[in-house]
Image (cartoon, rainbow, N blue to C red):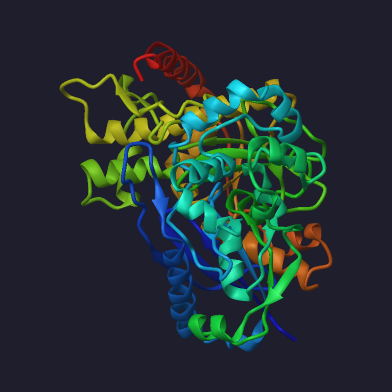
């Protein structure tokens, strides 16, 4: 009997791989960094080949150290960052770097669409607002600004579907990544051909949509040699990284909520009915019959990473957390707006930018670090409040991502939001979610509910400190007012 599942995560700054036993224990992990290019203001792009090279290296290194035989792997699941637009020609060659989710080059295209196409009509179909970061305006950008690329393009893939293609040779689009295209029917989980044509997107460019846990092919001989595996291992379609992380945190039932602490921040509330709101993000969960009402901020763990690289490169993240813990709640009046690449929900302002407010002589690095953590927590609270106004109230949050390793940061989030927080195996939640997809798709688990029970356990819990409520309520009001006063300048 095969005893392992392999999860692959295509993140923004690196890929991660992990081998799990059937009980969800990580037997081995790997990873490989790759760069993001910023060739112009508002641009952010990556080379898909670097994703694939990173995956191959990470798997090879991991397998070499694991002591696990590739013959014991029952299936492979791949998750990836959202809103890519990988342009492939008829031979499967990548035609250009892909703009990624933080890229805002398509503002003009979105304005043109709004001028000629009622936005409410689009929203009624796709359940999401017209935004430059999404996949569909990037396709139109190719058409307008890179006609030589557009003319050769046969298919547009997402980050995970590109890796699945390199593993299997199969072209697919998983259900959970459909929300990045406004020609996707969010109620039916299908492409809307009429909207596609009205937007000017050739229907032939869109791959067939398949359930996230469906096995779409097997590892080819060539891919197996590059990865250090054996041919024939089933590969499932995979899904959005946030959705797989939500699954890996054990969120499978309506009302359960994931708190995201990776490069980006935000939350995902599991619902069993269509629940669109233009201030938030709606997408299909990787679990069938479920949607995720999401709030996503650009300033999650990436904001602290930027702060570390900028003012304290000699410190580890653990050192930064220890320093933050020396500062009282409220950071001595220093407030941080974490809009480091524009801002997504609920502001939807690609021109929003990061701000430190309250700097003066005597302000320490420790205060700035804590203010950064508090600013990300305020952004989380803002999204949770909007979700509640839309009818989706979160209870206890399940935290995932590297930020959940910081006890002080997780406690700050609990104090700011007033929500209890549970932390399962935060570092591996996303790769575990991808592996669970492979386990359900290959029959290792009879259901998603059974898989969550077998693989997910809570390691730590945090309850809000009511003594800090008044401080953080005032800090949150300052946070909100700062943006309102500064947005025109931005």
Q: Is 87 positioned to the left or the right of 116 in the image?
A: left
Residue 129: x %, y % from top left: 62, 29
Q: Is 333 positioned to the left or the right of 126 in the image?
A: left
In which quadrant is the N terminus drawn?
bottom right
Q: Is 355 positioned to the left or the right of 22 in the image?
A: left
Q: Nearer the viewer, residue 333 or 213?
A: 213
As drawn, the residue found furthest toward the left would be: 361
Q: Nearer the viewer, residue 193 or 407?
A: 193
The residue lying at 47 percent from left, 78 percent from top is 62
The residue lying at 79 percent from left, 69 percent from top is 445
Residue 90: x %, y % from top left: 58, 67
Q: How many marks?
A: 0
Image quadrant where residue 166 sits: bottom right
**Residue 255 drawn above or below residue 148:** above
Image quadrant where residue 273 sits: top right
Q: Nearer the viewer, residue 425 or 49?
A: 49
Residue 79: x %, y % from top left: 59, 59
The residue lying at 75 percent from left, 28 percent from top is 124
Is residue 381 visible to the viewer in this orientation of the structure? no
């Amino acid at each position: 009997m095969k005893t392992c599942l392999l999860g692959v995560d295509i993140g923004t700054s690196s890929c991660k791989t992990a081998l799990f036993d059937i009980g969800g224990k990580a037997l081995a992990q790997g990873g490989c960094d790759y760069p993001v290019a910023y060739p112009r203001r508002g641009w952010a792009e990556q080379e898909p080949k670097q994703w694939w090279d990173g995956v191959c290296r990470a798997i090879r290194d991991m397998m070499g150290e694991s002591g696990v035989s590739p013959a014991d792997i029952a299936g492979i699941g791949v998750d990836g960052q959202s809103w890519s637009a990988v342009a492939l020609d008829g031979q499967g060659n990548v035609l250009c770097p892909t703009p990624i989710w933080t890229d805002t080059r398509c503002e003009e295209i979105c304005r043109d669409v709004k001028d000629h196409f009622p936005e409410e009509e689009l929203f009624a179909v796709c359940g999401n607002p017209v935004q430059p970061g999404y996949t569909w305006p990037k396709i139109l950008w190719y058409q307008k600004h890179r006609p030589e690329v557009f003319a050769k393009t046969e298919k547009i893939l997402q980050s995970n579907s590109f890796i699945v293609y390199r593993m299997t040779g199969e072209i697919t689009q998983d259900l959970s990544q459909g929300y990045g295209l406004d020609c996707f029917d969010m109620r039916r989980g299908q492409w809307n051909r009429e909207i596609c044509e009205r937007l000017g997107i050739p229907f032939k460019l869109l791959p067939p949509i398949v359930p996230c846990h469906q096995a779409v092919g097997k590892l080819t001989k060539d891919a197996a040699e590059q990865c250090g595996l054996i041919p024939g291992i089933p590969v499932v379609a995979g899904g959005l990284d946030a959705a797989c992380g939500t699954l890996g945190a054990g969120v499978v039932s309506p009302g359960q909520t994931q708190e995201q602490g990776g490069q980006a921040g935000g939350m995902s509330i599991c619902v069993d009915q269509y629940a669109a709101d233009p201030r938030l993000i709606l997408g299909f969960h990787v679990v069938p019959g479920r949607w995720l009402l999401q709030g996503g901020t650009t300033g999650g763990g990436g904001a602290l990473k930027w702060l570390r690289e900028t003012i304290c490169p000699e410190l580890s993240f653990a050192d930064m957390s220890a320093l933050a813990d020396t500062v009282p709640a409220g950071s001595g009046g220093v407030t941080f707006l974490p809009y480091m690449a524009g801002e997504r929900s609920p502001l939807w302002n690609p021109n929003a930018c990061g701000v430190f407010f309250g700097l003066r002589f005597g302000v320490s690095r420790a205060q700035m670090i804590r203010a950064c953590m508090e600013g990300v927590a305020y952004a989380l609270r803002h999204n949770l409040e909007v979700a509640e106004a839309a009818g989706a109230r979160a209870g206890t949050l399940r935290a995932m991502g590297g930020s959940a390793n910081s006890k002080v940061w997780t406690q700050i989030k609990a104090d700011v939001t007033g929500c209890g927080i549970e932390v399962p195996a935060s570092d591996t939640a996303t790769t575990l979610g991808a592996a669970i997809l492979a386990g359900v798709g290959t029959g290792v688990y009879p259901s998603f509910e059974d898989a969550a029970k077998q693989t997910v356990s809570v390691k730590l819990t945090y309850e809000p400190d009511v003594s800090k409520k008044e401080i953080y309520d005032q800090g949150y009001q300052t946070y909100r007012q700062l943006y309102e006063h500064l947005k025109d300048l931005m």
